Amino acid sequence: MAILIGLLMLSACGGKGYQNMTARYNGYFYADLRLNEVLKAIDDGYQYNYNDILKIYPEIDSGVINGNKSKLEDAFKKASQVIEWHKSSDWVDDSYLIIGKIRHLQAEFGLAVATLQYINQTSDNEDTKHAALITLMRTYMDASDTSNVEEVINYLDLQDLSEENLINYKITSAFHHQRMGEVAEMTRDLTLVSDYVRNKNERSRINFILGQISQAEGRDNDAFNYYKASLAGAPPYELDFHARLNMQQVSAFKNSSDIEKIRSVYAKLLKDGKNKEYRGKIYYEMGQFEKKQANYDEALGNYLKAVSVEEPSPRQKSLSYLRAGELYYDIYEKFELASNYYDSTISVMPKDEEGYDQILKRQLVLSDFVKQLNIIRVNDSLLSLAELSPVQLDAYLDIYLDEKEAEEKEAARQEARLNTGVAAPPANNSNTFGANAGAPGQWYFANETAMSQGELQFQRQWGDRPLEDNWRRSIKESILNESGVTEEDDPALQAKIEEAKVEETGARQAEKDKLLATVPTSPEAKAELGLASQEAYFKLGEIYRFGLEKVDLSSTTYQTLLEKYPDTEFRLDALFALYSIYLPTDINRSDSYKNQIIQEFPDSLTAKLLINPRYLEEKEARDVRLQGIYASAYKAYENEEYFKADQIIRGALASFKDVDFLPTVEYFGAILKAHTENLVSYKNALQEFSEKYTEGPLHDEAIKRIEALTPTKSGPVDDEFLYSEDFKQIHSVVLMFNYGLSDKDTLKTAIEDYNEKNFKDKKVFVGWSDLDPDRKVGLLFVSSFKTKEEAEAYHGRFKRDVSSLPVQIDPNFNNFVISRDNFRILFDAGKRDVSRYLEFAKRFYK
């Protein structure tokens, strides 16, 4: 009665006590209750990954948030009512904090930040302000605003926090470090508060996480103690189970009896009915335990049992596949089998699993390894089978199909053993190349042993028959001839014949025919398989070296390639790979491969770099110098100093070799001939350039210029207007002769000597053009004279001295002066009648 009177008095006076009481119990209490219900739903719905270090906090699931929308709306409403109706109460700031948390959960990060910053700026309560900043940290984290997270951390590190806020701050800070991959900082923060966390489940999870970190770092004793601490206070069964399971991995043991005790713990866990859904995990941990003891076969057996349990977790199943693959990869070095398990791993592993990208990378490497290995096996087998006689091939296929059938039965047996939880020991196969290597159902390598076995098998089954085609078709005749009776007289004989027919026409024969169709018969088909094998060998060497990091197997593969295919297109690359492989360990062997490269591929960039490691640097310097010379020549060209430009370019071409800029200089030299010689020389130079450089923009430009020089007119041309009367251009003096009677090279040298003796001050040269190959009439021309008068002066002297040259006079012999344009016209198709030009020349030249 007194309490009721007190409440009535508080209500009547409207005091702050009344405001605090109604704000807390009518508004804030229910808002906080609804918020905590949603937080629990997030935790309950989150699947913690016990194969990895547990998340400190569960990730916020938008599906859970949407499913609890009404609770969040109710909490928001009640918190808002406290703020609106009870402004003078002490619970306003706490209600704002609830609203900030709700906005954070709903991913309304901007509104959440504004709300939480408002609390920090306006609240008079330091604890509430600190609590708001801790929530602000988490909001910035989910908004991926790392810089602001760090800023809040730096601020809170300097504050005097309450025990509750200090615990929440350190846990939130640890979560930030976990997300950033900063394990040491996360461990530091969790260690500081692990003994003080009030929520039992949260304390158990923190100790479990510290146990996982200690185990990963090899601190087994610390890990054991943390796992043991996580069991205090009756944690959720899943955490309890995994803590007890992990304790076995970090237990200290001194002798074999301790190991057996741990194995007995695993056995008890398997028998416990509550652990049915965890059987895959138990087998996995058993595998991990045996692997730690170097009992690899037992470990493999447990991994395979782990993937065979009823309804295994996809994540757990993927990890069991992965560990089996790692054994085949790292321990057994059976890369084909490893590839199978990595394929299975990737097929079921969630993409958020730690290290997924690296696992995928190895799976792709192994997949490529198997691909190249199968190309080699299949192609080598087919090429070997192509060399067998028809009888040998038929018998070989019988052996192959028998073995394939036996392997399929064995595979079925192995699968049955697997389904019963008994793993077969790994086969002692090899990743090198040899007879009968390969997976079930693949072509085997054909070798001499297999061929001999084929012949023996044939003789055992069919007797010592002659090697004839279609021998099966003679079965009936042979049987009848040997028996001396007819088919109708002897039912047993008839059955024997029918049996042979069934064997010939059955499914086995159909499969054999299908295999026969894959055997290459033409040289082209065999060559194609050989090229594919060469490429596969080279790629396999690269995979061994860079993907699998097995340098010894890489070098063996490169050597096999060079031995089997000495003329392979990959020879240079394989030799260089072997040179670089042996360079750190066997300098003599490395030098041997280096010398092979230099001797066999002297013009290759590889050889040039091996001879001179500064080759590219020096080449670039030469390139720069040549570009400078070219620039000076081009400047002369622009000033119409064509002969000067030509002399510069000729000197450059004689001085520079093996320079990237050289084609540009050569092309420019061809263009100059249009100004320093004649159009025939110009056209010939362009043609030579386009044939030397068969692609690229300069080649295309040269072709365009050649096409522009090709006459487009057709039909008869009036001789009166055939030759040009434009004499203000470069001229040449031409000597026409029969090069069947006089050696052109000897004559050319004689003219050059004549010019050196009599016209030393003239910058002329001697060129050659084949005017009429059918009649062996050619032209040696002296170029280039800048004016008509210079050419006439030279020609006057040359005519008097021509008899001293080593040339035989015949009806084709003549000499004359000609302009650049008329030289081109003379060479146009159908215009090679020199007599017409000579008539023209008599009219216009002295």
Image: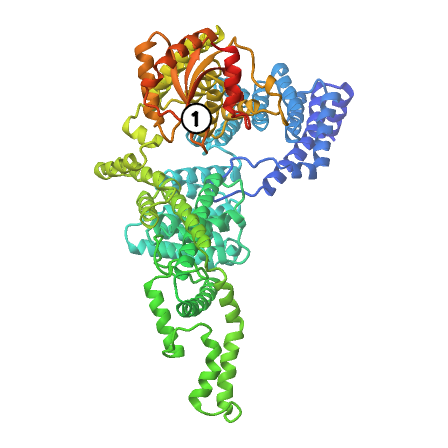
Q: Amino acid at mark 1?
A: Asn
Q: Is residue 4 above or below residue 416?
A: above
Height in image: 664 above or below 419? above
Q: Seen from this angle, which residue lies furthest left?
A: 588
Residue 787 in sight: no
Quadrant in the rendering for residue 36: top right
Residue to which mark 1 is pinned: 812
User: Is residue 370 shown above or below 154?
Assistant: below
Observer-nearest residue: 242 or 489?
489
Q: Secondary structure at mark 1?
A: loop
Residue in the picture at 40% in, 78% down: 462
Q: x%, y% of residue 841?
A: 50, 15
Q: Position of residue 697 (x, y in %)?
A: 52, 24
Q: Position of residue 680 (x, y in %)?
A: 48, 21
Q: In percent of the image, x 41 and y 70: which residue is there?
A: 391
Q: How is the image coloured?
A: rainbow
User: Where's residue 173, x and y in %?
Assistant: 50, 27
Nearer the observer, 619 or 801: 801
